[in-house]
Image: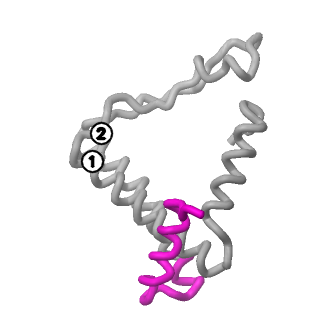
Amino acid sequence: MEETDCARLQHLVSQFLIRHRSILDVQSKLNESTARISRAIAKAVASCGCVQVHASRQRFPTDIGLGDLRGFLSTHLQGEPCEHCREDLEDQIGTTLFYLAAMCYITGLDLNTILRRERDRVSALGVYHLT
């Protein structure tokens, strides 16, 4: 059986998780890493300017179905992250994945199983999987 990327990551994390082995440490580092993702986006907007946020109330016709709703909603993000900002964002997301894998390892959960189950749930529910 071929080992998945998730399983490899989770195994590596289990080998290198030394300093922050406590569930409390991992939980706080996971929270910190997600905050750093937000900070990386804020810096791309406010410091670099490679992306802009143009936010306003989401407006869409009331007579459309959920399947058509996506065409009327905006991400509010305009532009593309420059190479530096993209790298920073990827690094922060990578750190978050590290601590997510650590959380799975410590709690005895399998990251790949969770990923597959979520993918199947989203796929089955389609547009009704509103998040």
Label 2: state its secondary structure: loop
**Residue 78 lies in the magenta stretch:** no
Q: Amino acid at mark 2?
A: Pro
User: Where is mark 1, residue-wise?
Assistant: 85
Quadrant in the picture for residue 44: top left
Side (left or right) of 130 relative to 25: right
Q: Amino acid at mark 1?
A: Cys
**Dot 2 and dot 1 residues touching (CB under 8 Å):** yes
Q: Please provide percent x and percent y for residue 36.
A: 40, 61
Image point (67%, 72%), residue name: 109
Q: Please provide percent x and percent y for residue 58.
A: 59, 25
**Residue 21 lies in the magenta stretch:** yes
Q: Please provide percent x and percent y for residue 28.
A: 52, 76
Q: Nearer the viewer, residue 88 or 44?
A: 88
Label 1: state its secondary structure: helix
Image point (69%, 12%), residue name: 61
Q: Nearer the viewer, residue 126 or 4?
A: 4
Within-10-Å neighbours for mark 2: few <14, some 14–19, many 20+ = some
User: Relative to 48, does residue 75 appear above or below in the rendering?
Assistant: above
Within-10-Å neighbours for mark 1: few <14, some 14–19, many 20+ = many
Q: Nearer the viewer, residue 86 or 61?
A: 86
User: Where is mark 2, residue-wise?
Assistant: 81
Specify the segment rendered in magenta: 1-27
Side (left or right) of 47 relative to 5: left
Image point (60%, 64%), residue name: 1
